[in-house]
Image (spheres, helix red, strand yellow):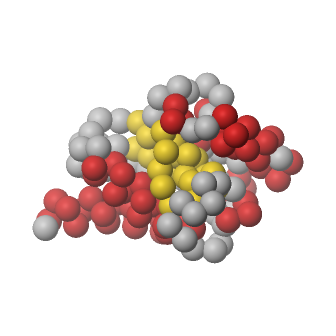
Amino acid sequence: MCLTIVAKSELSDAQVRFIEERLSAPEHAYDNGPPKVWRVYQQGLYAVVRTKSNQPIGLVEVSGLKDCISPGWWLDIDFRGKGYGTKLVDALAAYLKAEGYTGVGRIEIQTHDHAYDIASQKLAERFQGHFIQAQNG
């Protein structure tokens, strides 16, 4: 279940089409976070891609300074509740650290009808932990 973080500008045309099809699916009509800015932002957006299949399964939006990053993430409903969220935040933390990010700011939890708030909060804490460990170790 290896995941890779890929900048929006580096995605293939087929990957972009796939993402846009999934974002247009009725089950994602009320999703918040990165899907809301996918067609607007040109920088700070990334796809979460399954390494073996090269299939995008989620999105990440990153804003803020390198010592106070505020990410947002989204997983396609087909991949929720299967451990991909944990892998996503681990891959994102590794990617951002390699890009020189050193700290975490506020992570906004914005799930529709609070359906995924508890899971999202746990993922936010896990993500923050990657940076706390680096500061303490």
Q: Would you place residue 34 above or below residue 43 in this image?
A: below
Relative depth, front residue between 10 and 44: 10
Outermost right residue:
26
Image point 73% across, 60% down: which residue?
77
Relative depth, front residue between 70 and 61: 61
Outermost left residue:
137
Total number of numbered labels? 0
Image point 47% across, 29% down: which residue?
43
Q: Estimate the x, y position of residue 76 in percent, counting from the top left.
A: 69, 56
Q: Estimate the x, y position of residue 119 in percent, counting from the top left.
A: 57, 68
Image point 27% across, 39% down: which residue?
66
Outermost bottom residue:
82
> Where is the N terminus found, in terms of image quarters?
bottom right
Relative depth, front residue between 62 and 51: 51
Q: Estimate the x, y position of residue 58 in percent, counting from the top left.
A: 61, 52
**36 horizontally vs 60: left or right:** right
Is residue 45 visible from the viewing direction of this image? no
> Where is the C terminus found, in terms of image quarters?
bottom left
Image point 27% across, 59% down: which residue?
131
Q: Quadrant of residue 115?
A: bottom right
Q: Estimate the x, y position of residue 128 in percent, counting from the top left.
A: 34, 60
Is residue 38 visible from the viewing direction of this image? yes
Q: Would you place residue 123 above or below residue 67 in this image?
A: below
